[in-house]
Structure formats: C-alpha cells, structure tokens
Image: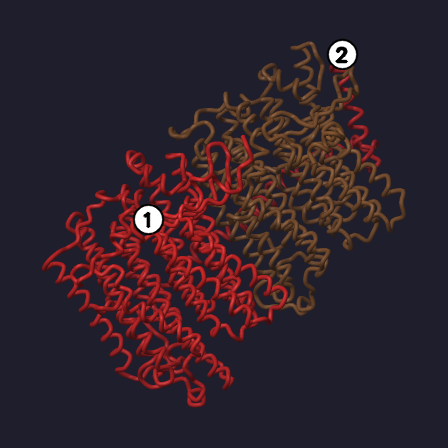
Chain colours: A brown, B red
Amino acid sequence: MRAFLDSIGYAHWILSVLLLLPLAGVVLVLLAPKEWARWLTLVVAIAEFVLALGLWITFDPDNGGMQFTATLTWLPELGISYRIGLDGLSLFMVLLATAMMPLLVWGSWFAIDQKVRGYYALLLALKTGMIGVFVSLDLFLFYCFWELLLIPMYFLIGTWGSSNRLYAATKFVVYTFAGSILMLVAVITMVTIVARGTGETSFAYDHLVRHSDLLAPYAPWLFSAFALAFAVKVPIFPFHTWLPDAHVEAPTAGSVDLAVILLKMGTYGFLRFAIPFFPAFALSRGVAAVFVALAVIGIVYAALVSMVQPDLKKLIAYSSVSHLGFVMLGIWGGTVASVQGAIIVMIAHGISTGALFFLVGMLYERRHTRLLADYGGLARVAPKLATAFVITAFASIGLPGLNGFIGEFLVLLGSFGRFPVAVGIATSVVVFSAAYLLVAVQRVFFNPITKPENLELHDATPRELAVLVPLIAAMLWMGLYPQPILRRTEAAARRYVETVRPYLPAATTAASTEAR
Amino acid sequence: MHPAPLLLQADAMPTGAGVPFWLVLALPLAGCLLNAAIAFTRPQTKALVSVIGPGVVLGAFAVAVACFLRLQAPGAPEALDLGLWRWIEAGDLKIDIAFRLDHLSAIMVLVVTGVGGLIHLFSIGYMKSDDGYARYFAYLNLFIVFMLVLVLGRSMPVMFIGWEGVGLCSYLLIGFWYGVQANADAGKKAFIMNRIGDFGFLIAMFLTWHALGTLDFAEIAARTPELAANGALVTAIALFIALGCAGKSAQIPLYTWLPDAMAGPTPVSALIHAATMVTAGVYLVVRTNGIFSHAPAASLVVAAIGAATALFAGTIALRQNDIKKVLAFSTVSQLGLMFLAVGSGAYVAGIFHLVTHAFFKAVLFLGAGSVIHAMHHAYHATHRDADPQDMRNMGGLRKWMPWTSTLMWIATLAIAGIPVFSGFFSKDEILASVFGRGAGQGVFYFFWLLASLASLLTATYMGRLMATTFQGTNRTGIAEQARLHEAPWIMTAPLVALGLLSLVGGAINLPHFAGGNAWLEHWLEPVLAPSHGVVPLVMPEGATEAALIGFAVLIGIVGLVVGVKGVLRGAVATPAEAVPETGFRRVLSAQYFVDAIYDRFIVRPVQWFAQTVLWKTIDQWLVDGVAVMGSAHLLQGIGWLGSRFQTGQLGLYLLLFVAGAVWVLGVVLQ
C-alpha cells in the first residue's frame, strides 16, 4: 500500500486535494438538483476520508518535522505563499475532520429538510476551512482559513439553528472576530519586525519561529493578541460564554463540528504558534501561572456549572469547556507525557463529545426537546440508544479502558511535577464529571417513564447505528490500544518540549526528570 | 523506535507453560460478550444464558485452581506472568497490559471465581422470571472480568482499569431495575462516592510516579526503602491510597453508598457488595504493604478508621428492619475490622478475614435472597402490598425454609465468632494482633476495645436478625403462609457449598493453638516481604492468648443470646402495628442521620454554589451580562457612527476586512 501511494506521489498532492475536494463538492452540490445534495456530499465525504487514510499509513512517526509539504508562491512581494504540511500534532486533527465528515452527512440525513443545497455546501466549505487551519504553514494562509471558517459556521447556526439562533450566531462571530482581529495585527507586526531584523519579508511559519528571538522584546503584546484569539476559541474561562449558546442553537452537525474541530483550533494555536513564537514570555512564571490557573478554573468551574444545567445540550457544552481545560494544563505542563496527553485529550474529546452531540440530536429528532425534564425511562423503549449513550458518557467521564482516560491521565501525571497543586485540584473533577453525566443518563434513560410521548419512541435506526457504532469502536480502540496514536504524536510532542524546555522553570519535585 | 509488538517479549510471556492462565480472564469476557449479544438480539432466551453465564465463571474457577496448584508445586515460580500489549507509552512512562498471578492474587482469584461462580448459579433461580435475564448475566460476567483485572493487574494503572470497571458494573447492577428512581439514584450515588476515593487513588499514582518513576507493584515493593527515606512523601502516598480504599471498601466517611446499594438484586449484593468488590480496598493495602508499613502514621489512620467504622456501623445494624440493610451495615462493620487489621500491620489476618467473610456473608446475603424470594412470591400471589424485605413481616420461617434457616445459622455462628466456625479464627486473629500492637503503642488497646465491642454488636444484631426472621411465630399473613416455600435446589445447592466453607474455611490459616500450621501466613510470606521486620507485630502468647480467646468467645455467645432473647421475649410488632421509635433508637434506625447531614451540608451547598453563584451570577450575569453585553452595547454606540456602511451582509464585512488588512500590510511594509 505504502509503495503504491509513493508511486503515485501521494505525499505531494494529498493535502491540496483534501483542501480542494470539498470546494469542488460545494460547486457540485450547488449546481446539481437538490435531491442529489446529500448523496453528492456523502460521496465527497467518503472520498475525502478514504484519501486521508493514506496519511495514517504513510506518516513517518519518527519524523518530528513537517511531512506532506507543498509550497507555491502566491504574493512574493509580500512574502506570502501557499505553504502546507503536517506533523504529529495536526495529523489527527485532519484525520478527525475527514473521518467525521461521512458521519455528519448520515447524521443530517433526515434532520435537514430545508435549503438542503445550501446546508450541504456550507458543511463542505467548513471542512476545507478546518483542514486548512491545521495544515497551513504560512501565517497569512492560516489567517485566511481561520476567518473562512467563521462564515459557514455563522450561516449554519443562523439558518438551520433553533429558536434563538441569530443571537447565538452573532455572539459566536463577534466573540471570535474580536479575538482574531488582534491576531491579524500581531501577525503583521511580527512579520514586520522579523523583516527588519533579517531583511526578508516572509509569513512562513519556519522563518518566524527560527527568528523568534527577534520578537522577544515585543512578546507581551504580541503573545497577548494571539492568546486572546486562541483563548476565545478553546474556550478558556472567562471567554467561554459564546460556546453554550452556539452549541444549543446549532444544528447537530454544527455542534459536532464545533466540538470535534473548532475548539481544537484554539489549543492547536497555542501549541503551534503562541508558545513556540514567544516561549520565554509564555512560559515565564507569571504567565504560566495565569494560564494554568485559568485551565484549572475552567476544568472545575465548567464541570460544576454543567451539573446544574436543565438543557442536555448545554450540559454537554459546558463539559467541553472542562475537557479543554485539561488540554491547556497539559500544554503548560511541558513534559512529553503532558503534551501527548493534551493531544490525546483533543482527539478523545472530539470522538466522545461528538458522539454525545449526535445522540442529543437523535433524541431531539424524536421528541423536539433538549430539556432533561422531558425525558426519563428511555432505556426501556430504546435500549440501543441507551447503551450507546451510557458507553459514551463513561468514555467522557474518563473510565479507563475507554478513550477519555488516556489523555487526562497523561496530562495530570505529566504536569504533576511542575504544578502539583493545580493537578490536585484538576483531578477532583473526576467526581464532578461523574456527577453531571450520570445525572443526565439517569434523567434521560433511567427513572420511570412519566411522559406518555416517551412510550412511543423508537430505538436507534440502522442509519443512526452507522453513526454511533464507528464512534464507539473508536472509543474502545483508543482506550485499550492508544499506542498507534501515541507513537505518531510522540515526535511532535518531543519537538515541542525541546523548543520550550530552555524556558521552563525547574520542576518542583526533585526526583522528576525532564521527560516525566 | 519500532512498533510496539502486540505480544511483549519473551521475558514477559507466560512463565507457567501449560497453564492457560489467560483463560481465567478470557472465559468471563467471552461470556459477557455472548450474553450481551443475546440481550440485544433475543432478550427472551434464558436456557442458553443459564449455561453461558455461570459456566464461564465456573470454568474460570477450574483454571484458577489449576494455576493455584501450579504455584503450589515444589520449585514453582513465585508468580505466573501474562504480558499482553503495550498500553501507554509517553516519555519515560511505559505501562503494559500485564497481569501477575502471585500468592496474594491467587487467593483473590479463587475467591472471586469460586464464590462468584456459586452466586452465578444462585442467580439462575433468583432471576428466573426477570425480563432482563441476559442483560443481568452480561453485567455479572463483566464484573468478574473487571474484578480479576483488579486483583491481577501488575501495575497501579492496570489495577485501576479493574478498580473503575467494577465500579461501573456496580453502578449498572445497583440500578439494574432502573425504572424505579430510588434504584437509579442508588447506583449513581455509589459511583460518585466511589469517585471521591478514586481521586485518592489517582493522586497516589502521581506521587508514586514522581517519587520512583514506576507504577509497577513489584518494582514499588522492591524500592520501598527508597520511599521510606522520605517520610512525608511515603505518608502522603499511603494516605491517598487509603482514601481510595475507604471509598471502595465503604469506610467512614465514604460508607453511605453501600447501604443504598442494596437496591440491586440480592445476588449482586452478595457478590459485589459483600464478598468481592468491597474488599478491594483491603486487598490494595495489602498489595502496597511496603508503603503502608513504612508509613506508620498513615497505617494508624487506617486502623483508626477501621475500628471506628466497625463499631459505628455495628450500632446502626442493631436497629434496622430491612433484612438487607442489617447485612449491609454488618458488611461495613466487618470491612472495618479488616481495615483495622491491615492498618495494624496484621496483613495476613486482614486477608484471612476477607476470605472467611466472603464465605459466610455470601451465605447470609443469598439466604436473605431466598427469604425475600419466598416472601415476594407469597405477597405476589395474594396481591398484598407489603414489604418482602422487612423482617417484621417474617418470623418462624424455619418451618418453611429449613435448609436456608440451617445454613444461615451456620453463617451466623461464623460471623459471631463461635469456635470451630471459620469466622472465629479470622476474627480472633485480628483481635489478638491488635491487642499485641498495644504493647508498643497504647492506642491499639483502645482499638482492640472498639473492635471487641463491634464484635459484641455483630453477634447481637445477627441474633436479632435470625430470631426475627426464622424463629418465633410467623407474621407474614395467614393466606401468605400457604405460599411460603423453600428455595429451589439451584438456589439452595450453592448455599450448601458456601455454608460448608463457612464452617471449615478457618482451616486455611488454622492457628498453632488449634493444631494447625497457619498455612495462609506462610503462603503470603513472599508478598509481605517488603514489610518484614518493619511493623512491630507481636502476637500474644500463653495465658494472654488463652484469655483473649476466651473473652472473644464469651462476647460472641453473650451477643447472640442477647440478640435472640431480645426478640423472643415479646411479640414483634409488624410494620403496621409498630409505634414510632424515639430517642437513641430513632437515631440508630435513622442511621445517625448521616445521609441527611451530607445532603444538607455538602450536596445541597455544592448544588446551590454551582447553580446560583457560578452559573446564574458569574456566568450569566457577570461574564455574559456585564462584560460581554456591556462591551457589545459600548461597541453599538461606536458602531452607530459607522452605520452608514452597514449593509447587513457578513460576507461583505469579511471581504472588506481582508482587503483592509492587505492594504494595512502594504503600508506597513513600505
């Protein structure tokens, strides 16, 4: 297989094809009759996923640098070019984005019956934006994809969302936009500064990282601009209030895409850009203290708030904030284990929270309500849905043997040496995460059936099982045998740790070595 | 770097060639998957499930016996190893899915599969008419798998898979009849309270890793002297492990989930909430005995918690009327005794009592199950709405259920510590060991006193339970009496086997005074090597020993007599006739109001804090209202100035924005 892929030059064109194929799909969907829209999208989605599988096969785990690179000059006078590539950090984000695509189409199959063409076209456009963000190696290109994502998401929420959709969509755009304007200013300033120092104007990621020492004097301002843009996206407390609204109002596919990919753009931004550009400032005691504190606050605060939500979708939305806090903690933990843990949490959260949003969508399609109080006793009428929900809930709770445990365990273990108190507080969330999800399980699937409508509900259909079973299989696989993923992320994590290590204050525990 | 091989290298391969050790795990796992498949596809199938469910566990027991015999053979390896695959590797951390059957885990595996197999058999009769039959056996098989992972796991994280897995099964089985809210509540409560303990387990792992750079039990044991050099650290590790154990083994202050766990089917109470899962905390302390013996302060805490729990739960058991509640508090109390033992460094005594308790408490719970089964059928037949678990509705049942009555009496004599019954030897060893520690540290005399009082209470409440249930006159009802019957043989036969074990189980560690050679003590020597000579455990001898034994026996007899006489002295009031209790009796029957106190001072304040302070005030008012909308209004004011450019099309804004940005860029770069 590998030889065949090499013979067709797979490594050179694959990322560009992954970026262009969904756009071609957009054109097709818009031109074809509207009955064809979902079928066309499905074909494109499956093709995209199958093509992306080659990345998994041919990715070289021992190479910590960029692979599958391609470069085209675009605006040479401004130092802007089309520069793309992939490392262990972005590999799984791209795989996740492409693997989720067919499931999103299946998941939307009957739920979307209005403006079908527009919906699927936007879904495809969103995919290009997502992949673009994770493969861009040119800051201008990155910024374009970053902003490009906003538009389809805005319309997905604003058009196919539920009752309060316009408020949520606007809030989403304003929040994210406010952060990213500053990021653009910072990018331009950075390029200018580096250009003055080196005489070469370039938006290339490598060039800027290599000369990051030139940026050090301006680091507080530049880092803050990046950090704000990414913090909103993650979201870090207290920039998180757009998320519950966006999730609640978005259609299922929008919620899933938000949870699986869009939130990860924030944490990815910290790992790829904000910290490697300004390591000395970002990892200084004071700044690290702020981010670790916000991460831990987010972890515990969001779990507690999640516990009292009457709306199932909001409950899951807040749980996302809690999970993403682990990623932030792992990034600042600065050890191979904690950074790999952070990457694993990003993947695992995508799978289990994605599945939870699919499940909520399925419940919503049946009962047209998201309120826990409207459910109860569903396990009796829908045992398959109940089983899927319980497994997914326990994956999200962090039961060892399922996917959620691996990443959180590595983050906590790896960060313990540097931030023992923060890890101690963060670990307490094992109690609250069980509390909020088991409350949800009980109020939806257990207890007596009190509403007559719930007696009539049908169990999971084959189409729904086609969405849920692959996700549950992925949860089990990642929980029991995460080594293939850990191995492919290790080199990138190690490279990141080596970049930041000179700037890290010494760990507090004497016995711990650098890699622990 | 090469891909991690799925099967690890030769040194980690099974050393016990010819002994299919992996079958111990594989059989119940296969059973679970098959039963789950049946539950989904043909939920009404029962015959096949009755073969698979118990069959795989009994098969695992046979394999366990074969492995045990191999370990016992002369020149046998110290342990059988099974390395499956590399689970997690990140940085220096390397965790394998690897299992080890050593002398300690061999005992546990025999108990789990042996007692577990018998309880599976009993379940065939007990659950016969339940709609969720296949689902029940799928859960029960899965529990056996996780319990085996717990006791066989070679490292802390692998053990943690089992540790949380049994918690999952406990959750599913407590809430097995999920259509009743109380059951679902109880399952949820059990899982969440256990997670408080799991927090301790996790922190203990982090501390151990940072201190030693390993999480492998054997390596930890080998390197305890290193740990011992840092007293504060080793004490902290031990205390966090103890927190985990207190959750799993239902000790103060985390015991309140166990009485509620009785909401599950009674065989589940016998298997999970008496014989196996709840003893995992005791097992973990013994597994990490090196850490505990080098942390005397933490061990003292464990002993104190154990003694206090034993007495406290014993008092509550005195005034419960639900037959399962009595047994639940009895279990909490007996686990307290085991905690006291391992906290006092009497690790062998702790494991000894764990084993005998598994036998006699399984008899008591299964016997109670037979009683409830009969009561339920009687009330069901006459359509009377009365509580089949309330002992006040029973009385004189030995007439209809002679086998159950006799076997439960055997178990009662065992738990009361009457000589020759198994519990006598194990309880006596705990009391004697604790007393022996008193010579060095006076506080142990106090613990001994508490434990002796707890033993007195044990005999008393068990006497009360047996007299109220089986002796005296019957209160079930005239019409119902005709429907009362002995349990079918599929339920009675496992009870007979367990009753025999309750009778003779003391033989595994028969003390020298009884002509034995303390087999278990020798058997566990290699496991306890890390604490050898560290804990000053001096067993009383001669006249002291004899006096202690005499006193313990006296306590047992007095307690039983008081308990039985207290019931038979007058007529027992049925629930309908009962007058409300007052004074301290009310406090006891209300279980010291601990649940209400937790609810009032912990659960509700946390919920209030989350709801009112965090969500409504900080999230909605401060962040969303003041900060976000405030700045939005501010911007709106500014935006009004530019409103002439407003076309309402976001796409155009973005286009303008990007164009502007490029223009800025050009200017800046010139």
Asked if residue B365 is positioned above or below residue B237 in the image, the reply reads: below
Q: Secondary structure at mark 1?
A: loop
The spot of residue B452 in percent (x, y) is 22, 62
Give whichever of discs 1 and 2 has the lower sequence position.
1
Q: Quadrant of the N terminus of chain B?
A: top right
The spot of residue B104 in percent (x, y) is 33, 52
User: Which residue is disc 1 drawn over?
Assistant: B76
Residue reaching furthest to the front? B18
Residue reaching furthest to the left? B543
- What subunit carries mark 2? B
Asked where in the image residue B254 lies, by quadrant, the reply is bottom left
Asked if residue A204 is positioned above or below residue B585 in the image, the reply reads: above
Tell if the residue under mark 1 belongs to the same chain as the one under mark 2. Answer: yes
The spot of residue A100 in percent (x, y) is 70, 44
| Residue A412 falls left or right of residue A386 | left
Asked if residue A168 is positioned above or below residue B577 in the image, the reply reads: above
Image mark for residue B670: 2
| Residue A223 falls left or right of residue B659 | left
- What subunit carries mark 1? B
* Amino acid found under the numbered disc labelled 2: Gln
Q: Residue at x 78, y 28 (%)?
A: B657
Asked if residue B52 is positioned above or below residue A132 in the image, the reply reads: below
Asked whether disc 1 touches disc 2, contact meaning CB atoms under 8 Å apart, the reply is no
Label 1 and label 2: CA atoms lie apart by 83 Å
Q: Residue at x 42, y 49 (%)?
A: B17
Judge by depth and name the residue closer to the eye, B517 or A332: B517
